[in-house]
Image: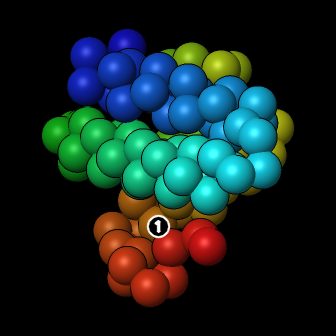
């Protein structure tokens, strides 16, 4: 797996677990840390994907890439759906506006 993507994924998964275990008073900070790390992870995936030759032209082709398969095996189910949504944007070469990111 690409080093930058792997590091960003590990941080995201750690923050996901921290968010799940956070006490009520810490839950907002944990959620913010998770959200921030998730989008850093997506940015790392986007950067890696932009270097691929040839570029995957469909979401199916992208999701079938060996590294993407490794990623999806590690993602908890709720994160898989968010990842798949972001993967569609990556394939379409579209960017999410800050305000449109998950709240």
Q: Nearer the viewer, residue 103 or 70?
A: 103
- Provide residue 26's location: percent of width, then percent of height: 64, 47
Q: Quick check: 31 above or below 63?
A: below
Residue that badge 1 annotates: 89
Which colour style is shown?
A: rainbow
Quarter of the figure with the C terminus: bottom right
Residue 9 image point, x, y percent: 46, 28
Comparing 14 with 97, the one in front is: 14
Task: Report whether 71 appears left or right of 56.
Answer: right
Q: Quadrant of the N terminus?
A: top left
Q: Is residue 97 above or below residue 87?
A: below
**In terms of image quadrants, where is residue 77?**
top right
SS at mark 1 in the image: helix
> What residue appears at the point 25 percent right and 25 percent down from the top-left corner?
4
Residue 7, can we see it? Answer: yes
Residue 68 visible? The answer is no
């Amino acid at each position: 797996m690409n080093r930058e993507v792997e590091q960003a994924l590990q941080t995201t998964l750690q923050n996901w677990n921290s968010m799940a275990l956070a006490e009520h008073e810490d839950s907002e900070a944990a959620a913010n840390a998770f959200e921030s790390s998730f989008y850093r992870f997506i940015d790392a995936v986007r950067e890696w994907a932009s270097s691929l030759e040839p570029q995957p032209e469909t979401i199916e082709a992208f999701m079938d890439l060996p590294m993407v398969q490794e990623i999806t095996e590690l993602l908890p189910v709720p994160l898989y759906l968010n990842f798949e949504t972001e993967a569609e944007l990556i394939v379409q070469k579209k960017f999410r506006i800050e305000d449109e990111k998950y709240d």
